[in-house]
Amino acid sequence: MRRFSQSPWFRYDDRVYQRYVMSSVKRLMPRLQAIQFKLQFEEQLNNIKPDVVAVTAACEELRKSETFAKLLQIILLVGNYMNSGSRNGSAYGFSISYLCKVKSRNVIRGGRK
């Protein structure tokens, strides 16, 4: 680039020439973002790898746990008992998001205050 700025026919500053060249590149931003992603990918992968391994191990532990399976069975039985007589009375399963609601007072007391 320096040789162009020193030639007699090119009188612009280096920065102006750089801007000219960069403006002529089609889809410059997506290309730069792809290059940046490619350069940072290995580092980001190494950063999250321990967390992914820990979550995978925890999921495997829960899947193999007989105690957790019994707990889920008890929750389903209690839910079916509380809903007896309604259309939800004999459920075969429940949404996992229901587990967050189990500790709330209204679920434990049957919706009464």
Image (spheres, rainbow, N blue to C red):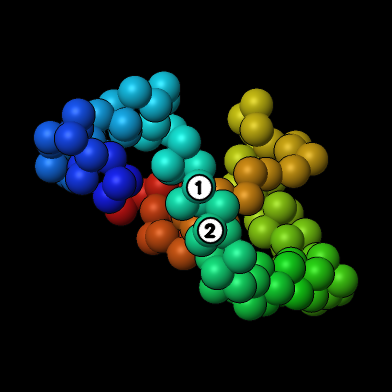
Task: Tell me if 74 is positioned left or right of 5 in this view.
Answer: right
Which residue is painted at 46% across and 64% down in the image?
103
Task: Tell me if 24 is positioned left or right of 69 in this view.
Answer: left
Q: Position of residue 69 (x, y in %)?
A: 80, 66
Q: Nearer the viewer, residue 59 or 107?
A: 59
Q: Nearer the viewer, residue 25 or 34?
A: 25
CB of mark 1 within 8 Å of CB of mark 2?
yes
Q: Secondary structure at mark 1?
A: helix
Q: CA distance from mark 1 to mark 2?
A: 6 Å
Q: Secondary structure at mark 2?
A: helix
Q: Nearer the viewer, residue 30 or 92?
A: 30
Determine which residue is flagged by label 1: 35
Which residue is painted at 31% across and 33% down in the image?
22
Rendered view: 47 above or below 25: below
- Report whether residue 98 is seen: no
Please name the amino acid that badge 1 sits on: Ile
Task: Tell me if 91 is positioned left or right of 66 in this view.
Answer: left
Determine which residue is flagged by label 2: 39
Q: Nearer the viewer, residue 5 or 69?
A: 5
Query: Around disc 1, counting alpha carbons within 10 Å, would you say few (fewer than 14), some (14 to 19), or many (20 or more)?
Result: few
Q: Position of residue 39 (x, y in %)?
A: 53, 58
Rendered view: 104 above or below 67: above
Please name the amino acid that badge 2 sits on: Leu
Question: Quarter of the image holding residue 75?
Answer: bottom right
Which residue is painted at 53% across and 65% down in the image?
44
